[in-house]
Each structure stands twice: as C-alpha cells, then as structure tokens.
Amino acid sequence: MILLQDGFIYDGSLNDGYFGSVLIEKDKIKKIFRHNEVCEKNDEIKIIDCRGKIITPGFIDAHSHNDFFALKKDNLFYYEPFVKQGVSTMVTGNCGFSAAGYEPDSPYNDQVGGGLFSNDGNDYSDFQKWGKSVDKNLPVNLLSLVGHGTLRIGLNGKTSGSLTEDQMIQMEKTLEKTLDSGAAGLSLGLMYEPGQFVPFEELERLTKIVKKHNKILTVHARAYSKVSTSYNPPIGGRAHNLRAMDEVVKLTKNTGVKTEYSHLIFVGKSSWSTVKESLQILEKSKEEGFDIGFDTYPMEFGASVITVVLPTWYLSMDKAKRTSKIIQIRLAIEIYMAIMALGFGFKDILISNTFGQMKEIEGKRINEIAKIWKKSNLKTYLEIIEKTDGRVNVLMYKYQNKEIIEALRTHPQSLYMSDAWMEKEASVQNFACYYAFVKFLLLAKNNGTSISESIFKMTKATADRFQIPKRGSVQEGYFADINVIDLDHLNYQENQCIHPTGIEHVIINGKIVVEKNEIIKKDIFHSGRFISI
C-alpha cells in the first residue's frame, strides 16, 4: 500500500481543494483521509510526504495520436515525456486516423495512418484484439476512437473516388463492430486524405451510427484559417474556418451526436479576427441543447504534414498531370493569394522530420531552405514534397497567440490536450510532449485563474466527456492515477525538449512510475491499461 500523506488535494472537481491524505491499495484508491482524520500506519505502507505539495488526479490528454506507438518496441521513448509532465491517460485515434479498426487483410494496410503515422506493416484491423495486445504493455492508460480515414482507407485506399453503396454498407458494418469492441467513438479528419474528398452524406450516415451507440464524434475540420485551399475558390466569401465550423455544427444538429471540435486554432494572423465569432457559434449551439465542445493546447504552433497547405484539387490530381505548366501556374497563384490573405507563409513552416530522407533540412524553415538552395519559397516547398513523396512532418507557427490561448483555456466548453507525439527519426520534437499540461497549470497560477478549474479540465471533465470509467478523480474506489506536484517549484523551458520540474511523483494504476522526478523503469513498462469504452 501507498499513503500520500498530508497534501493539498484537488480531487478533479470544480470544488476548492482540501488538506488530506490518500491511501492506495493495489490499483485503487482505498481511503481518503481529511486533515483531521488519522490513518493507522504499518510496515506494509509506503509513506510519501506530501506536505507543501498538491495531490491531483493523473492528467488525461484529450487529444492524442499515441495509439500508433503503443505496440512499438521500446515504447517508453514515446511516452516518457508525457508521463513526466503528469499524463496518465491518453485519448487517441484522433483526426480521422487510428491504429486499429478497419477491414481485415486490407491491401491498403500500409496507408491506414494517412501518411502521418504507420503500423510498420502490422495488421491491427481487429480493434478488440489490438486493445488486448496493448493492455498492460505500455506506460500509460490508453483509449481510442476509430478513425474515419482509417476505415475508408481500409476499403478504398486514400483515393478521392466515391465509395460504392456496397462499400459504404461494409464501412458502416466495420464501424458498428469497432464501436461494439470498445472504441470510444469516431474521429473525422476533413483536412486530410481521404476525408477531404468525402461528401457530407457519408459523414452523416456514419455519425448516426455513433449517436446510436451513445458515443462521441471528434472532428478535425476542413479549415482552421480564414483563407484555405480546402475551398474553391480559395479566396473570398465567408471565412473558411467559419464555414468549416458551420459544417461540423450542421452535422451535430442533424444527428444529435456529442461532438468534440478538435484543436480549435486560428492559423495565420488574418484568422485571429474570427475567434469571437467561432466561440459564439459553439456557445449558441450549446445553448440550443446540442452537446458540442472543443479541445485546446497552450502552444502557438501545431504539428502537421507538409502537404496540408496544398489545395484539394491538386492533391486529387494524378501526379503525372501535376507537372503541367498551366497546373503549376494555377497552383502558384492560388498559394500566393492564400498566403497574402492569410498572414501566414512559408517562413512559418518548420521541417521537423523527413524520416531520414533529407536530414540536412530538419530544424529549418522553408524560407531558410529556399535561401540555401537559391530558389523561390514555392519551388523549394514543392521540391521537398517531390523528393520525399510528401512524407515530411512539420511544425506550423502562427496558429494562435497568448491572448487566444487564454480565451480558449478559460472557456467553459474547452478541454486540455497536447496533440503531440515523439518521433525517433526527428531532429526537432514537438515541445508540447514535454510541458503542455505543466504550462496549463502555470497559466492558471500566474494569471490568477482557478487552479481547480484548470485541473478539472485536464482530469474529470475529460473523463466524463469520453465516458472513461473511474478515472479523472481522486475518489475512493477509483483507479489510482495520481500526481504529487510541488506547485512552488513547477516550471518548464519554453521551446525546449527538457522535462519540467515540480512533477515529483506520478502514480498509474497504483504503481509509482515517477519518483522525485525520475522514471521508475521496473514499474512503468506495464503500468498502463487499455480502456474499453
């Protein structure tokens, strides 16, 4: 048994914290002692002195992609930075792509990660079997949505072509089976192939199945900027990120499904004027009785793939036709006009990972590479795509600013997340892997907003939204996912891949996996559970 003695407990609710102690037996919280209650001690109890520290539920990352790393060898690399910032549970399978849940023996098995991720040739089509393989074989708890892109790729690859009615029926059956097998819901990736080609009717049919199962829909919308290449023409009319939000709201209202708007961001300075209206749309939908929220991170950049900037018509075109002079001129004009209108450009795209293909450009921005190559930014950008077949991950800046981060993190409909993953081949990691949740806590502390509310958003609120049983709260009978934090010494280094200070102990399912800021390797490899919803 473990006794967390004499700490200040934030139990995950919106209530004020209180002084007390927490007794852990096996993987559960056995007893909570208020300040004036005494716990009898014996030699079997390991006592952790929590005086001057806070005790919180383990943090739940509401938007993650770390299902793709669960069954890799030496998987601690992918999870250690998250655990050391207090994350005990991850909601995975977001943005239309999940590691599992698609057609068995699919000829497109190598494409199910959509170019962002890979199953390394393994067949994880059977969601239930995959979940059992993951259980107790990774450092954190993990639940997963099933990705629409993964479902569709399993049937038809990343092609832009429409599904036949027979294929559509088959995809619906696979979705039903996967939801029955414990998937937390369905995720859409409408900015990525093949989601960007999909008609609204297909989305609606699948979403009705999600609603029938009383599960959640998460959506990476078609656009997160005022001007985007997801719409044709790319310039003019209602702001594209607002059009994209209208589509998600329409889907929510047509089906009544519980919806989570993935990583609400505002790419490019021109888009920042739409923050108020975006929040008003979400607020109005909530007031009308529709269950819609969003998740957010505290970073001014986001991770994506290099091709996300390209227009849909160009991506759907046969590669042989792309070299046409007319096509190249049209592409150049559309991208130039979009950049001018957006307040975002090639200087804001940093190459983080070329998967060993062009190591020399990693850590550099497109405009820096262009100067070295003595070519235009556009030619440089397209040449990188051509030489790597588009398999390049990037960090894209000007996604938001400090004021927007503050507005989103304190909004009543927001949850907290990282949207980050580690890449062994990369020269530059996403800094959110190391300190996103620590930054959220410090923003609350330093800006005079509620610590309880901040902890609530990254624990109980997320557990409730995704229907995660008996986690996200410091309650008797709940699983012992708990952090002990020295709030006075909590700190991180901005834009650095350095573990934060102040996360003193992390306990996952009753096992101490971080002690005095150090990973306990004998316990961490098998501490995590797969959570079937």
Image (tube, grey):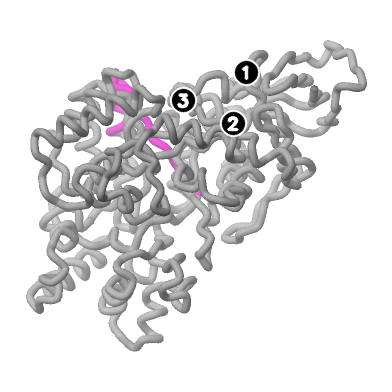
State the SS at label 2: helix
Q: Of 66 and 476, which appears nearest the observer?
A: 66
Asked if residue 294 is among those painted magenta in the image, a careful observer would answer yes
- Per the model, the C-alpha gap separating discs 1 and 2 is 17 Å
The amino acid type, in three-letter code, at marker 2 is: Ile
Residue 455's label in the rendered image is 2
Vertical side of 343 occupied by 95: above or below: above
Judge whether residue 93 is colored magenta: no
Mark 1 vs 2: CB contact within 8 A: no
Q: Name the residue at 26% across, 79% down.
A: 379
Q: Which residue is mark 1?
A: 478
Q: Nearer the viewer, residue 197 or 179?
A: 179
Element type at marker 3? Answer: loop
* Residue that appears at 63% across and 48% down: 80
> Label 3 belongs to which residue?
532
Residue located farthest toward the top when viewing the structure as drawn: 37
Depth-wise, is mark 3 or mark 1 nearer the camera?
3
Which of the 4 image quarters holds residue 209? top left
Q: Amino acid at mark 3?
A: Ser
Q: Which residues are magenta?
A: 281-298
**Which mark lies nearer to you, 3 or 2?**
3
Residue 228 lies in what quarter of the image? bottom left
Q: Residue 213: percent from the left, percent from the top?
A: 31, 19
Q: Nearer the viewer, mark 1 or mark 2?
A: 1
Q: CA distance from mark 3 to mark 2?
A: 24 Å
Q: Amino acid at mark 1?
A: Tyr
Please state if 155 lies on the left or on the right of 408 as rendered: left
